[in-house]
Image (spheres, helix red, strand yellow):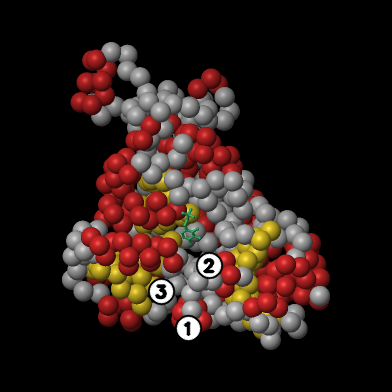
C-alpha cells in the first residue's frame, strides 16, 4: 500500500525509490524520507489527490487487488497516497518501523487504546499526562470495562506496585504539560519489558528532534502533529509510531472509525515537516533564552523548564533530551489571578491561545484557559496555581520575545 505509480512497497527505504532512513540524519529525513524520488507528473512535491474513492479498470482488477493484497488505494477512509508518504516520513523521523496517521492527536490515542484494550484490561498512567487522554480512559474506556490507574509522575515504584496480571499498557508523557516533568525512558521501557506490558510515550512536547523513545525501547510513541510536527498553527493531525505488526490492527480500526486526514490536510503536514529541524532548533533556542531571562527576573517566583539546572527533572532531561523545547511555564511572584492575567494582556508578540509548537508564540494562563471550571482544591491537586503562565515560544527572534516579556513584567 503506497504511492502510485512510482513505488511498490510501503516499507521505508525499500528499493521503491524512497530513501533509506538509517543512513541519514534527521534534517535530511524531514525533507526527503518517505517520498518517491520521481513523483506523478514529475512534480517535486507530492501531489494532492482530491479523491474520496479510487477506480478499478474492471472486475478482474478488483479481484486481483483483494487476492494479491496489491498496494493501491481503494476508498478514502482507508487511506490516501499523501498520507502514506507522511506515515513513512514520520516513522523515519522517530526511527520506527511504521506510523499510523490520524485526524488529531486525540484520535490517535483513542485509536491506539481502542485497538489494543479489551474488557477486563487495565492501563496505568503517570498522572501528569494530557488531561483529555486520562479523561478518555477514566470516563469512556471505563464504560467498556477497562480500568485506569494513575500514579504520581516519575514514581516508578508506585507504577510497578500498581501492575496486576490485567495490566496491558503503561502510559506517560515526556515532558509533561505544563510542569515539564521528564521520564527516564529506559527505566520506563524496562519496567514494561520485565512485566510483559506494552509502553506508550506521548512525546508531543519533545518531538523526534529532542527525544528518542523508540531507541530507548518504548513500544509506541504518540505525537499530536497539530503541534511541532505540523508547526504552523494551521492544521490538526496525530500520529502513533511503532512496529508494523503492532500498528496493523490500529490502522484497521482507523478505517472503521474514519479518523483519517483529508488529502489537503496531509499536504499541509508534509509541507510543514520540510522545515521541522530548523524550526526545532529555533524553538529550543527561544525556550532556553526565555526561561533563563525569566529565572533571573525579580517579578518571577519560579520557572519550570527542563533545560534549567533548577528544574527537578533537569538530570533526566539532560540524559534523555537533545534540546528542551519551546514550552516555558512560570509563576509570577506575589500575583493573584488578575495580576497574572495583566501580564498576559500586556504582551504584544505572543498571541493568547491554547496549543503550542507553531511558528507563532502563544501564551496562556492555565487557570483561565484549561481549569476555569474546576474548584481551587481541584486546581491545587493538578498543581495549577493562580499565578501560573504557560508560554509556547515560536520561532520569532528570541531577543524580541525577551524584550516583550520584560516590558509586560515592568508594567
Ligand atoms: C495537544 C496534545 C494532545 C492532543 O492532540 P490534538 O491534536 O489536539 O488532538 C495530546 N497530547 C499532548 C501532549 C498535547 O499537547
In the drawing, what numbered circle is on residue 127? 3
128 left or right of 391 in image = left
Q: Is residue 126 visible?
A: yes
Neighbor class of circle 3 (other Cα within 10 Å; few <14, some 14-19, many 20+) is: many
Q: Is residue 93 visible?
A: no
Mark 1 and mark 2: span between their CA atoms?
15 Å
Q: Helix, strand, or loop for circle 2?
A: loop
| Among numbered discs 2 and 3, the one appearing first in the sequence | 3
| Among numbered discs 1 and 3, the one appearing first in the sequence | 3
Where is 234 relative to 325, above or below? Answer: above
Spot occupied by residue 117 in the image (x, y as percentages of width and height): 24, 58
Neighbor class of circle 2 (other Cα within 10 Å; few <14, some 14-19, many 20+) is: few
Where is 209 relative to 86, above or below? Answer: below
Q: Residue at point 55% right, 46% down?
A: 235
Please state which of residues 339 and 326 is positioned toward the viewer in this rendering. Answer: 339
147 left or right of 35 in image = left
- Residue beneath disc 1: 377
| Among numbered discs 1 and 2, the one appearing first in the sequence | 2
Q: Residue at point 34% right, 51% down?
A: 111
Residue 158, by quadrant, is bottom left
Q: Helix, strand, or loop for circle 3?
A: loop
Neighbor class of circle 1 (other Cα within 10 Å; few <14, some 14-19, many 20+) is: few
Spot occupied by residue 409 in the image (x, y as percentages of width and height): 77, 75
Q: Helix, strand, or loop for circle 1?
A: helix
Find out if the beta carbon at label 2 lies less than 8 Å from the nearest ligand 1 atom: no
Where is 354 relative to 250, above or below? Answer: below
- Residue beneath disc 2: 370
Mark 2 and mark 3: span between their CA atoms?
16 Å
Mark 1 and mark 3: span between their CA atoms?
16 Å
Amino acid at each position: 500500500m503506497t504511492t502510485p505509480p512510482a513505488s511498490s512497497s510501503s516499507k521505508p527505504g525499500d528499493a521503491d525509490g524512497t530513501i533509506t532512513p538509517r543512513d541519514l540524519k534527521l534534517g535530511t529525513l524531514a525533507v526527503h524520507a518517505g517520498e518517491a524520488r520521481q513523483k506523478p507528473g514529475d512534480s517535486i512535491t507530492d501531489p494532492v489527490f482530491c479523491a474520496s474513492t479510487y477506480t478499478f479498470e474492471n472486475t478482474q482488477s478488483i479481484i486481483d487487488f483483494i487476492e494479491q493484497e496489491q498496494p493501491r488505494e481503494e476508498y478514502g477512509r482507508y487511506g490516501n497516497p499523501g498520507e502514506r508518504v507522511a506515515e513513512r516520513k514520520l516513522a523515519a523521523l522517530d526511527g520506527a518501523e511504521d506510523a499510523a496517521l490520524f485526524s488529531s492527536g486525540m484520535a490517535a490515542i483513542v485509536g491506539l487504546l481502542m485497538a489494543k484494550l479489551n474488557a477486563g484490561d487495565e492501563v496505568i498512567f503517570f498522572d501528569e499526562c494530557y488531561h483529555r487522554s486520562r479523561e478518555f480512559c477514566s470516563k469512556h474506556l471505563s464504560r467498556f470495562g477497562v480500568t485506569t490507574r494513575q500514579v504520581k509522575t516519575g514514581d516508578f515504584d508506585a507504577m510497578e506496585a500498581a501492575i496486576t496480571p490485567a495490566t496491558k499498557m503503561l502510559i506517560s508523557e515526556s515532558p509533561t504539560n505544563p510542569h515539564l516533568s521528564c521520564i527516564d525512558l529506559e527505566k520506563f521501557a524496562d519496567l514494561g519489558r520485565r512485566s510483559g506490558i506494552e509502553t506508550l510515550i506521548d512525546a508531543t512536547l519533545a518531538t523526534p528532534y529532542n527525544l528518542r523513545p523508540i531507541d530507548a525501547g518504548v513500544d509506541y510513541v504518540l505525537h499530536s502533529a497539530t503541534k511541532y510536527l505540523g508547526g504552523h498553527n494551521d492544521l490538526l493531525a496525530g500520529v502513533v509510531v511503532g512496529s508494523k505488526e503492532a500498528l496493523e490492527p490500529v490502522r484497521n480500526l482507523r478505517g472503521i472509525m474514519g479518523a483519517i486526514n483529508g488529502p489537503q490536510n496531509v499536504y499541509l503536514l508534509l509541507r510543514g515537516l520540510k522545515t521541522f529541524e530548523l524550526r526545532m532548533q529555533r524553538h529550543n533556542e527561544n525556550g532556553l533564552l526565555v526561561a533563563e531571562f525569566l529565572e533571573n527576573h525579580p517579578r518571577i517566583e519560579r520557572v519550570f523548564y527542563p533545560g534549567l539546572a533548577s528544574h527537578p527533572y533537569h538530570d533526566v532531561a539532560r540524559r534523555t533530551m537533545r534540546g528542551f523545547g519551546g514550552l516555558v511555564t512560570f509563576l509570577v511572584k506575589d500575583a493573584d489571578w488578575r495580576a497574572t492575567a495583566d501580564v498576559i494582556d500586556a504582551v504584544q508578540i505572543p498571541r493568547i491561545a491554547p496549543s503550542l509548537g507553531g511558528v507563532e508564540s502563544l501564551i496562556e494562563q492555565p487557570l483561565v484557559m484549561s481549569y476555569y471550571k474546576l474548584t481551587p482544591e481541584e486546581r491545587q491537586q493538578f498543581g495549577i496555581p493562580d499565578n501560573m503562565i504557560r508560554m509556547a515560544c515560536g520561532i520569532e527572534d528570541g531577543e524580541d520575545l525577551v524584550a516583550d516579556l520584560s516590558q509586560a513584567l515592568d508594567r
